[in-house]
Image (cartoon, rainbow, N blue to C red):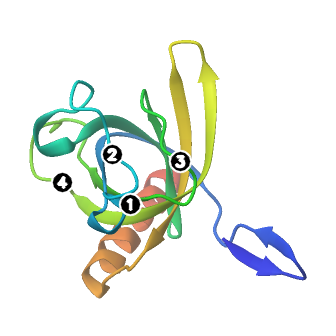
Amino acid sequence: MHEESGLIVRRHARRDLVLPASISIAPEHQAMVRFSSNICERDGWVRATLTDFSPGGIGLMTHVYVPRMAVLRVRVRELADDEGSPILDIKARVQRVIMTDRRPAYLIGTSFVDVTDEQRAIIHRIAARMDDQDSN
């Protein structure tokens, strides 16, 4: 998010993209936020679905509430490889959380934090693939 004249505005347009993902609380916030062991999979990870993507952040859908400003570790996988190596493993700060219905399900908007050069290159490759698909 970016502030101009006191307004918080988005720097990048979000684009719809659906991929399997998983989230965990980043180490720096684990003392304040913890997932219950009965909702987690192995090693404290919770399943999620990536719903949108931009060079500045991603949207996620999950059955677990995560408070605003919490920092997550997010692993995004290829659609055909739900259990394989992630194509992106990155930290993201929760900017907004919306309960979508009574299932419960939560739509989580995030912005990337502490992005390395390697992660930035992966983000740009994903964005370029999306641009290529749009032009075809």
Dot 2 falls on a residue whose secondary structure is: loop
> On screen, 84 above or below 75?
above
For marks 2 and 4, give the one nearer the viewer: 2
Nearest to N terminus: mark 1 or mark 2 = 2
Q: Nearer the viewer, residue 124 or 136?
A: 124
Q: CA distance from mark 4 to mark 1?
A: 17 Å
Q: CA distance from mark 1 to mark 2?
A: 35 Å
- Label ID, residue 129: 1
Asked if the residue at tag 2 contacts the one at tag 1, i.e. Cβ–Cβ closer than 8 Å, the answer is no
Q: Amino acid at mark 2?
A: Arg
Asked if the residue at tag 1 contacts the one at tag 4, i.e. Cβ–Cβ closer than 8 Å, the answer is no
- Label ID, residue 67: 3
Mark 3 burial class by Cα count in 10 Å: few <14, some 14-19, many 20+: some
Question: Would residue 17 appear left or right of 101 to someone viewing this image?
Answer: left
Q: Which residue is mark 4?
A: 86
Dot 4 falls on a residue whose secondary structure is: loop
Q: Amino acid at mark 1?
A: Arg
Q: CA distance from mark 1 to mark 3?
A: 32 Å
Q: Position of residue 54 (x, y in %)?
A: 53, 62
Nearest to N terminus: mark 2 or mark 4 = 2
> On screen, 135 above or below 121?
above
The image quadrant of residue 80 is: top left
Nearest to N terminus: mark 2 or mark 3 = 2
Q: Amino acid at mark 4?
A: Pro
Question: Would residue 86 appear left or right of 19 to someone viewing this image?
Answer: left
Q: Which residue is mark 2?
A: 34
Dot 3 falls on a residue whose secondary structure is: loop
Question: Would residue 51 appear left or right of 115 to someone viewing this image?
Answer: right
Asked if the residue at tag 3 contacts the one at tag 1, i.e. Cβ–Cβ closer than 8 Å, the answer is no
Asked if the residue at tag 4 contacts the one at tag 3, i.e. Cβ–Cβ closer than 8 Å, the answer is no
